[in-house]
Image (cartoon, rainbow, N blue to C red):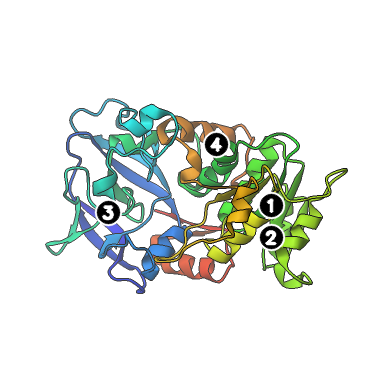
Amino acid sequence: MKTRAAVAVAAGKPLEIMEVNLEGPREGEVLVEIKATGICHTDDFTLSGADPEGIFPAILGHEGAGVVVDVGPGVTSVRKGDHVIPLYTPECRQCPSCLSRKTNLCTAIRATQGQGLMPDGTSRFSVGGERLFHYMGCSTFSNFTVLPEIAVAKVHPDAPFDKICYIGCGVTTGIGAVINTAKVEIGSTAIVFGLGGIGLNVIQGLRLAGADMIIGVDINNAKKEWGERFGMTHFVNPKEVEGELVPYLIDLTKRGADTIGGADYTFDCTGNVTVMRQALESAHRGWGESIIIGVAGAGEEISTRPFQLVTGRVWKGTAFGGARGRTDVPKIVDWYMEGKIEIDPMITHTLTLDEINKGFDLMRQGESIRSVVVF
C-alpha cells in the first residue's frame, strides 16, 4: 500500500514529505493508521546526527496514536478498530526482563529495533526500490505504520488522538519517572531541571504523588508560569542566581530543623551532562535520589566526586518513565479521561504533515511545549 510520510533522508536535513510503500503486517504484527503524532526532542536528537544509533534514510516519530486497520497471523491482543498507542518500549511479558518485574526494558525485539528493522530483520517501508528504516520501532511520522503486536497498547476508544499521542512518550516518561522510578512519597521536596515537555510532566507527577516543595529550574523565565500551572511551588533561573547554583538550591531546600538541605529527589530533563551533575549534587546528603531522564549526545559522559555518592546520594536513570507499555499506558490514558492529569494545555501547536518541519523549528526555538501533527 501507499502512505504519506515525513522521511529523514540524512542527518541535519529537513524532513521530506513523500509517498512511500508500506508492506502489510506479517505474523505477530499490526497495521496502524496513525491519526496524530507528537514531535519530541528525541526525534530532533536523531535528526541532528548526535544519536549514536541514528540510521538514515528513516521515518522518524515515536509519539503517536491511531487505529488498528489490519493484523497479521497470530495476533490476539488487538483487533481491527481498536484504538492504540505505539510503544517504543515494548512489553512482551515473556523475556527475562519482563518476568523480573525489576525493569520495563523488554529485550524481546531490542536488537532489531536498534537496527531500524522489524523483528524478522526486514523493513516494511521503501521508496523507489530503496529500503527505509523504521525508528524506535514506531515510525509515527507516517500516516500508516506496522508494529509488532507487543509494541502497541490498546486504549480508551473515546480518548482524543491529538492529545493522547503525547502519552506515547512525554507524559508517560515524566509522570512515570516520579511514580515508577523515584517512587516519590507524600511531603517530599523535589527539584526539576528543565521545564520543557518532560519537565512539566515530572512536575505534574510530583503533584500527583503529593510532593510538598517542587522547585523548577530553567533559564527561560517564560517557563515559570507553565511550571506553576502544573504544580511547581518555586522557580529558579540559574542566570539570575548570585554565585553557584548548587549551594543556592541546597539552601533553598532547608526546612525546619534540617540544616543540611538538598532535595529528596531531583530530576534532570535537559540531557546536559553539566546539569546532570548539578542535579545529583543538589540532592540531600544521606538519602537524596537524582533521576536522569534527558539523553546526552554521543560520547558525552557524566562525572562527580565519589564523595557525593559515598555520602548516600543515588544516581538513577529511567527510560519511558519505568512504565510497562501495554500495562501502564492504558491506565495513564484513563487518568487523562478522568481528569487526574492534564494534557490539553501542553499541546501548544497543531500542524499538518506538510508543516512538520515548522514543528521542529518551534521546538528548537523554545516556542512550543508540544507540537502535534494531525493526519
User: Residue 116 falls in which quadrant of the image?
Assistant: bottom left
Name which residue type carries label 4: Asn
Badge number at residue 180: 4
Q: Secondary structure at mark 2?
A: strand
Badge number at residue 134: 3
Q: CA distance from mark 4 to mark 2?
A: 22 Å
Asked if the residue at tag 4 contacts the one at tag 3, i.e. Cβ–Cβ closer than 8 Å, the answer is no
Nearer-N-terminus badge (3/2): 3
Q: Secondary structure at mark 4?
A: helix
Asked if the residue at tag 4 contacts the one at tag 1, i.e. Cβ–Cβ closer than 8 Å, the answer is no
Name which residue type carries label 3: His
Nearer-N-terminus badge (4/2): 4
User: x and y percent of residue 135 in the render?
Assistant: 31, 54
Badge number at residue 217: 2
Q: Residue at x 39, y 40 (%)?
A: 105
Q: CA distance from mark 1 to mark 4?
A: 17 Å
Q: Secondary structure at mark 1?
A: strand
Name which residue type carries label 1: Ile
Asked if the residue at tag 1 contacts the one at tag 2, i.e. Cβ–Cβ closer than 8 Å, the answer is yes
- As drawn, which residue projects farthest toward the right? 256
Q: How many neighbours does mark 2 have within 10 angstroms: few (below 14), some (14-19), or many (20 or more)?
A: many
- As drawn, which residue projects farthest toward the top? 76
Q: Is residue 69 above or below residue 40?
A: above
Nearest to the observer: residue 44 or residue 340 = 44
In this rendering, would 149 be left or right of 254? left
